[in-house]
Image: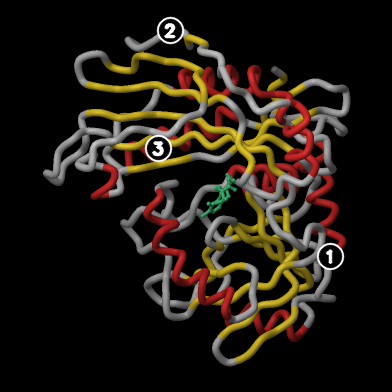
Amino acid sequence: EADLPLTFAFEQSAAPIDTVERARLLANPGFGRVFTDHMAIVRYNEQQGWHDAKICPRAAFQMDGASAVLHYAQEIFEGLKAYRLADGGTALFRPEANAKRFAESARRMAMVPLPEAIFLDSIRELVRVEKDWIPEIEGGSLYLRPFMIASEVFLGVKPSSEYIYAVIASSVGAYFKAGAGAVTLWVSQDYTRAAPGGTGAAKCGGNYASSLVAQAEATRQGCDQVLFLDAVERKWIEELGGMNIFFVMDDGSLVTPPLTGTILPGITRDSILTMARAQGLTVREEPYAIDQCRADAASGRLVEAFACGTAAVVAPIAEMKMKDGAFTIGSGGPGQTTVRIRDALTGIQFGKLPDPQGWLERL
Ligand code: PLP
Ligand code: COI
């Protein structure tokens, strides 16, 4: 590729957060509120291609009010984590899968795809600088948020000719306050997330903007997360606002909605499918209707459900609520298959279990 190799210049922060304050922040970081001292940036324009790669102090962006992203939302992002391993090392989990998905999201949004090697180098360089920001708490990690925005100053509706790619890093603990408990879902029957031919499979900011009103409804209904149904028949279970979903049947098989273009192809989803198949479990990627789900929960055929994603990891689902009532899944608490899958996944991510697929990248 013409843009490679690109070396990242390092500009050290002149005013890093001091170690005492950092220790205080890392003791209870929550999710997405604690940020590290540095960020990665790479710029693109048509004359220079990808250029000006650097790791620099995290600072506010200066943007012209006519920057394309502010109007037409040409924006994509990713989410992946760096882990402190049991042996003290640092590792990423399947970062090349995020690099690939980022390029695919870019293509869908008519953006210039970032070469995967530049994505990977930006993550590696930033984590090397910021690895002391990985919290020591149980389940703690450094959440990396790569993103790209259309930065051309122009109000015409067309793909931007300039982009800013950046990576920020956030020290995180559990995504849900409930921690290891089970979450409740509100089944959105008025709002859908993505239609066939739309942007559902891309990780673009617009998908999340449009989900917020449904998530707010879920919160009003006393639920943790919104569950979206398909946009055509309003019947088939798709995914949550920021997580994929799995079901565990009474015969031990796993069911998850297929990748039909309207849901995000989760890397956690793919990892769970791969691990389950390797263990000889029956897994089916097939449509599952909400009415069937409700009937199966009542009959005991459906015994567990869980949400999965980088931020949420594996979160047991206790209950679903919809306009005409609520129903409990299984015992209403974390089921044994869900817990086994979560432990198998985090065991690899934290370097406590063998990694037969070679998913961990040690830094
Ligand atoms: N679905 C949506 C809408 C998401 O935002 C995410 C989070 O990234 C996922 C699913 C899970 O994807 P992954 O497992 O790659 O984090
Ligand atoms: C992730 O799991 O990385 C996500 O992007 C979900 C969310 C925080 C939007």
Q: Is residue 359 left or right of residue 289?
A: right
Q: Is residue 127 left or right of residue 111?
A: right
Crowd tier of the residue under label 2, counting other residues whose Cα lies within 10 Å: few below 14, some 14–19, many 20 or above: few
Crowd tier of the residue under label 3, counting other residues whose Cα lies within 10 Å: few below 14, some 14–19, many 20 or above: some
Q: Is residue 145 left or right of residue 150?
A: right
The image quadrant of residue 23 is top right
* x 33%, y 17%: residue: 50
- For label 3, the SS is helix
Residue that sits furthest to the left in the current view: 156
Disc number for residue 5? 2
Asked if residue 228 shows in the view, the reply is yes
Counting from the top left corner in percent of width and height, residue 90 is at 75, 23
Asked if residue 358 shows in the view, the reply is no
- For label 2, the SS is loop
* x 25%, y 13%: residue: 48
Disc number for residue 335? 1
Mark 3 sits on what residue? 104
**Distance between mark 1 and mark 3 Cα atoms:** 35 Å
